[in-house]
Image (spheres, rainbow, N blue to C red):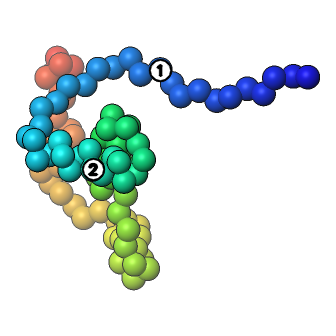
Amino acid sequence: MPSASIPTAPARSARLGLRATPEQEMILREAAQVKRKTLTEFILESACQAAQDTLLDQRLFLVDDNRYQTLLELLERPADDNPGLQRLFSTPAPWDGG
């Protein structure tokens, strides 16, 4: 009879240290207990979720259909003349010996 493989969590090798006030520790422990998690599991999961949310806030923008359509129209519009930008791109870069 083949043995069933039990998925294992990746080994935790990075060590993080933090200091908390007694009040912060108390609320973290209480929340971890409510979620039936160890304090470490609760803090890591909560911190990782907050980090993902922060990163998504920088990359993902949700807009309604009207605003999205307006954005598409702006992106498809021909660029306005910009003499300063044309000068910049026609000047050789300093590292190119210009």
Q: Distance between the residues labelled 1 and 2?
A: 26 Å
Where residue 72 appears, as percent x and y from the top left, is 41, 70
| Label disc, if present, on residue 79 of the rendered structure | none
The quarter in which the C terminus is drawn is top left
Residue, x 17% and y 42% (percent of image)?
A: 25
Q: Quadrant of residue 3?
A: top right
In contact (CB < 8 Å): disc 1 and disc 2? no
Whichever of callouts 1 and 2 sits on the residue coming sooner in the sequence is 1
Residue nearest the observer in this picture, 17 or 51? 17
Residue nearest the observer in this picture, 22 or 20? 22
Crowdedness near tag 1: few (<14), some (14–19) or many (≥20) residues, C-alpha within 10 Å: few
Tell me if residue 93 comes above or below residue 27 in the rendering: above
Residue nearest the observer in this picture, 82 or 9? 9
Where residue 81 appears, as percent x and y from the top left, is 22, 61
In the structure shown, which secondary structural element does the residue marked by tag 2 occupy? Answer: helix
Tell me if residue 7 comes above or below residue 80 in the rendering: above
Foreground label between 1 and 2? 2
The quarter in which the N terminus is drawn is top right
- Name the residue carrying label 1: 11
Q: Quick check: 89 left or right of 65?
A: left
Q: Quick check: 10 left or right of 35?
A: right
- Name the residue carrying label 2: 30
Tell me if residue 65 comes above or below residue 20 in the rendering: below
Residue nearest the observer in this picture, 40 or 48? 40
Looking at the rendered structure, the kind of residue marked 2 is: Glu
Looking at the rendered structure, the kind of residue marked 1 is: Ala
Where residue 37 appears, as percent x and y from the top left, is 41, 43
